[in-house]
Image (cartoon, rainbow, N blue to C red):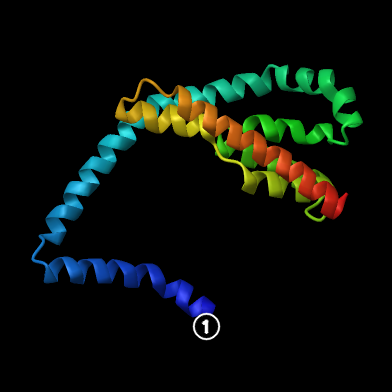
Amino acid sequence: MIILLSNYIIPLMILFVLLYGTYKKVPTYEKFVEGGKEGVSLAISLLPFLLGMIVSISIFRASGAMDAFVSLIAPVLTFLHVPPDIVPLALTRPISGTASLGVATDIIKTEGPDSYLGKLASTMQGSTDTTLYVLTVYFGAVGIKKMGDALKVGLLADFIGIIASLVICYLLFG
C-alpha cells in the first residue's frame, strides 16, 4: 500500500493543483510557463555563488589543509572519544551538501555501513544542514546582504547537531 501511494502521490498532487486552478479560473498553463521562466533566471543567478562554493571546498580538501587540521587536533579528539575520521564530515557539512555526502560516502565505503563510523556519519549527515551553502547561494541570489544572525543561528544549530550525533551514537553504538 505504501509503495503504491508513494508512486502516485506527486502526480495526484499535480493533478489536484491543475484541477483546482482550472476550477478557480486561473490560467494554469500560463502560470506554469511564468514559473518556469523565473526558475531558469534564478538558476542562472545562482551559478556564480555555487561555483565559488565548489571551488573553495575543492581547494581546501586538495591542498591538504583538511588533513593537517585533523592531524593537529587528533589527540584532543581521541581524549574526547571523537573519531578523528569524522572531522572532515563535520567541517564540510555546514558548507556543502554534495561535499559532505562525498565524505560520508567515503567513510561508509571504507568503514562499512554498520560500523560505528558509518552510523555516526549517517546520523551526522541527517542531523545537520548546509548552512553556509544556503546563506551564500539563496541569500545571495535574492540580494540579502546582512545575514549575521542567520549565520550565527545556523552554525549554532549545526554545532548542536554535530554534538548530538556524537553523543547519541556514542550512547547507542559506542
Return the x and y of residue 132 as percentages of the image width and height. 52, 29
Left or right, 150 with respect to 128, comes to: left
Find residue 79 and report its image quarter: top right
Look at mark 1 in the image and give the residue it sits on. Answer: 1
- Residue at 13% x, 68% y: name it: 22
- Residue at 27% x, 40% y: name it: 40
- Residue at 45% x, 30% y: name it: 135
Whether 13 is drawn above or below 89: the answer is below
Return the x and y of residue 47 as percentages of the image width and height. 38, 29
Find residue 18 and report its image quarter: bottom left
* Residue type, mark 1 in image: Met
Whether 157 is drawn above or below 21: the answer is above
Left or right, 81 with respect to 47, comes to: right
The reply to whether residue 8 is visible in this rendering is yes
Whether 81 is drawn above or below 14: the answer is above
Local SS, label 1: loop
Q: Label 1 crowding class (10 Å Cα cut-off): few <14, some 14-19, many 20+?
A: few
Left or right, 52 with respect to 24, comes to: right
Return the x and y of residue 121 as percentages of the image width and height. 73, 45
